[in-house]
Image: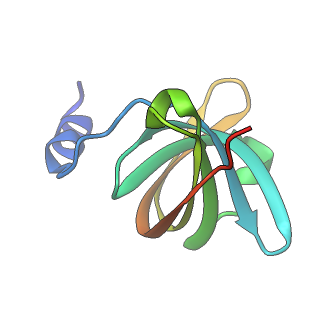
Amino acid sequence: MTGSAQSASNRRERQRYGINAPVTVVVGKRKVAGFTQNLSNQGVFFHLAAADSAMIDGDFDFLVELPPEITLSTGCSVRCQGRVVRTENLPGQLTGIAARILHYSMQRMASV
């Protein structure tokens, strides 16, 4: 582990959970699909197509869809406001975006 990666890991106050869930980033009237890599109640790291990531800068809104396997009940949507803290170029024309969660609210999905 590099020094900067190790110090970033040590700064984390909350445990992060490796969760691969759909995320929808809302930029103006446009919605951009991606997926999470990890999530906590204060932050998220997610992947977007590199072409779409350029639209996200500073504060933004996004929605994470948590399936029943993760919530251990019905699925739910987590509507969030976040702030970009870091971006990474990833293989496969993807960009990783680390964001601090400024505010969130949860909505249970109706069971079918």
Q: 80 and 59: which one is in front?
A: 80
Q: Position of residue 97 (x, y in %)?
A: 54, 49
Task: Specify whether residue 20 is in view.
Answer: no
Task: Specify whether residue 86 is in view.
Answer: yes
Q: Is residue 57 left or right of residue 88?
A: right
- Marks counted in the figure total 0
- Most extreme residue toward the right is 29
Q: Position of residue 100 (x, y in %)?
A: 40, 62
Q: Position of residue 37 (x, y in %)?
A: 50, 34
Q: Is residue 43 left or right of residue 97?
A: left
What residue is shown at x 14% (from left), y 43% (from top)?
10
Quadrant for residue 111, please give it: top right
Q: Position of residue 83 (x, y in %)?
A: 48, 68
Whether 109 is drawn above or below 30: the answer is above
What residue is shown at x 26% (from left), y 37% (from top)?
5
What residue is shown at x 69% (from left), y 58% (from top)?
25
